[in-house]
Image (spheres, rainbow, N blue to C red):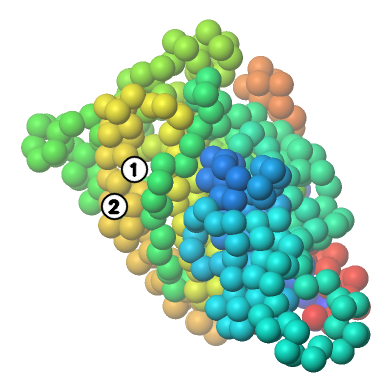
Amino acid sequence: MRTERIEGLVDDRPGEKIFRVHRDVFADPELFELEMKHVFGKTWCFLGAESQVSKPHEYITSWIGRTPVLVTRDAKGVLGAFLNICPHKGTQLAHAEHGVSKYHVCAYHGWGFDSSGRNVDIKDLEKGLYPKSFDAYSHDLIPIAKVASYCGLVFGSLSDEVPPLEEYLGDIRPFIDMAMKQSPKGMEVIPGRVRYTYRANWKMQMDNAMDAYHLTSVHASYMDVMTKRSRGEGLADDRSYDWKKRLTQLGGMFDFPHGHSLIWNNQAEVQKRPVYATIDEVKARLGPLQADWMLKSKIAMIFPNFQIADATTLNLRTFRPISVGLTEMRVHCIAPIGEEIGARRHRLRQFEDFFSASGFATPDDIACFESVQRGYAAEPYDYLQGYFRGFDSVEKGANDMAAELGIRPLHSQVGDFELTTEATMHAPYREWVRLMRDGVARNGGAK
Ligand code: FES
Ligand SMILES: [Fe+2]
């Protein structure tokens, strides 16, 4: 594949306010293979939360693209991240998403590894008459190139060439802080998760979380239910927000280098936000500006496949590419460590209401993703028009709100809720093009 083809897939002409993405970006299996190598192989990817691996020998399994990864704390508490495969024949080693284990034993021929990744047993080694040449090779688990944490979130990379994690995250970090510093004791992943697959490309979720334009059409039934609840019909506790009030609020976006972006909205009913119960403590600890921003609804897109949604409730959303038209979602609800039981219950009910696999959002979103993926098969169709909305009010650099926060976004935007900008999706595709073009150029056009 040639770099010209890659560049042609995203028609990005900011001077003319044109931004279009070719349908092949979502549907071409050859591009998918290149993404695994040049995007997922060359960035930092979210692996899990430190609270999930807080004790010696505790582990989680995760993925970087299609590469299985084992994140485990050893006996001394040191965190390591390894390819979750056995070096003997490549079998996936650990299968549970989370557990505590001093040893991991391969299901195929029984090789054993400790929680530091060291090989501790090769079954029937003596009788196996291995040649001396076998000793020249390490039989330990293979560490991934980089692992690092930011604010309780663990990221890993298959590449040595990525910038340091803090530099990669850049000025999206204050928004990670706003999610992860909602409590003086830190935040934890609530045990359990929502996991499902959808039959569409991974970038459908990348776009959709940053796309508030779809809310009033795809989630019309949710809004109807909200209206009924606000009239006292059905379940009328304070898990639901009044959408009519929400539509009157200001919103906007920022975007950053390395493909990250953030969409935010003021909230009319701040008292329903899970953080509201402890907002005085937050104000005292972090100041009124941080507290004010914690009450806003926000979704942070951390390229390539991780989102922190603090909208109807606070959750971590990871979307894993399986094939060009199949993606797995994992959604973890997070909460303050030691949260009061009533507040925890309220948080979980809000989470289930909208974001769980059977909640008001997920099935309707998935139906659209799969419908869109079918649409990509239309041969005479080329560029999508879903990236123009809001272009006219995008400002270069920092606006007043960014300046107040002390961040330096590449672009800023502020407007009515109904602006529902699509400019939030530009930064991820710019980074996608940069990585794909550089990767293809490096490989001389070969895969
Ligand atoms: S593949 Fe793991 S022991 Fe053989
Ligand atoms: Fe949705």
Q: Is residue 440 left or right of residue 269?
A: right
- Asked whether mark 2 and ligand 2 are closer than 8 Å, the reply comes as no
Residue 18 vertical position relative to residue 348 in the rendered view, above or below: below
The quadrant in which the C terminus is found is bottom right
Instruction: Give the Cα distance between marks 2 and 1.
Output: 8 Å
Closer to the N terminus: mark 2 or mark 1? 1
The quadrant holding residue 35 is bottom right
Question: Is disc 2 in contact with disc 1, using a CB cutoff of under 8 Å?
Answer: yes
Residue 433 visible in the shown view: no
Considering depth in this image, is 235 or 380 the residue closer to the camera? Answer: 235
Considering depth in this image, is 53 or 15 the residue closer to the camera? Answer: 53
Q: Position of residue 248 (x, y in %)?
A: 37, 28
Residue 299 vertical position relative to residue 364 in the rendered view, above or below: above
Residue at image point 73% right, 89% down: 127
Report helix, strand or loop for mark 1.
helix
The quadrant in which the N terminus is found is bottom right
The residue labelled by disc 2 is 359
Mark 2 neighbour density, 10 Å: few (under 14) some (14–19) many (20 or more): some
Residue 133 visible in the shown view: yes
Amino acid type, residue under disc 2 in the picture: Gly
Amino acid type, residue under disc 1 in the picture: Phe
Residue at image point 38% right, 59% down: 365
Mark 1 neighbour density, 10 Å: few (under 14) some (14–19) many (20 or more): many
Residue 280 vertical position relative to residue 188 in the rendered view, above or below: above
Q: Position of residue 368 (x, y in %)?
A: 39, 65
Report helix, strand or loop for mark 2.
loop
The residue labelled by disc 1 is 351
Residue at image point 61% right, 37% down: 152
